[in-house]
Image: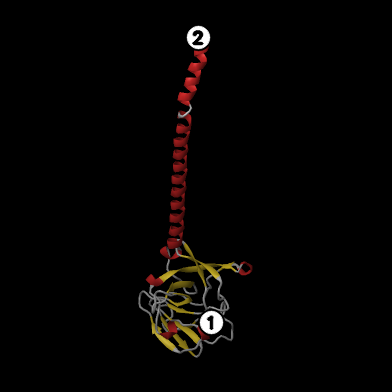
Amino acid sequence: MDEHNNPSSSGNDQENSAPENPGFSFWGEIKSIFKETLEFLLTLALAVGLVLFVRAYVIQPFIISGDSMFPNFINNELIVVNELTYHFEQPQRGDVIVFKYPLNTSEDFIKRVIGLPGETVSIKNGKVYIYNAAHPNGIALNESQYLNADVYTGHDMTMQLGPNPYFVMGDNRPNSRDSRFGWNVPRSDIIGKVFVVVWPFNDAHAFQTPTYNISNH
């Protein structure tokens, strides 16, 4: 009887326990998938947040549209703008900046800083003159580091800048909408400073701010 009962008892144990193992395995698998999905979503959220932070406050890519900065910056080039620098220092003469176009802030422009806050900028006979505390009688700006000798800066005018805005121009002087046409760039509209061209790869290079024959003070 014992030998007859034992197999029967063993068989009952298998029947009773068999449904339990798949059940535990199923819920364990669900928990594992849920945990992995949650970890993935958290990682993705952190990555997206980091990208948005970097783009909003550190660097941002732009594609140049137009020829106003030719030949130093060319149409369809991919540039990277440093948005962090101007949190620690002010824009300098010669910096190439990306900013909100003051007459239509939905447009982003790229130009070179020529006149600083508090200065007077005058264009006469194809030359740019800067008037400031260090040069009350004015001094001609030497732009030979980025303009060819035959470039003529047209549209004679004079603009006195207040304590906040900047006077900007494109390097392609005959084909640039810029401060010569009566507007300037408030500090708050400046997005950042161009610091590298990344595309096309065969022309990738860092941008260097030129030096001038003029004191800013």
Residue 159 occupies which quadrant of the picture? bottom left
Q: Which mark is residue 2?
A: 2
Residue that sits furthest to the right in the current view: 202
Tell me the residue at 45%/78% (across/down). 168
Please state which of residues 132 and 52 is positioned toward the viewer in this rendering: 52
Query: Is residue 149 toward the left or the right of residue 52 in the image?
Result: right
Crowd class of label 2 (few under 14; some 14 to 19; many from 20; radius 10 Å) = few
Q: Where is 91 relative to 143, above or below?
A: above
Q: Secondary structure at mark 2?
A: helix
Tell me how far mark 2 sits from mark 1, CA to CA: 105 Å
Residue 41, horizontal then vertical, whole percent: 44, 49
Give the structural element (helix, strand or loop) at label 1.
loop
User: Residue 200: where, in percent of width, then height?
Assistant: 60, 69
Q: Residue at x 46, y 82 (%)?
A: 177
Q: Earlier in the sequence, mark 2 or mark 1?
A: 2
Front: mark 2 or 1: 2
Q: What colouring method underlies this structural image?
A: secondary structure
**Residue 42 against residue 215 in the figure, above or below:** above
Residue type (three-letter) at the residue carrying disc 1:
Asn
- Tell how many labels: 2
Q: Is residue 35 above or below residue 166?
A: above
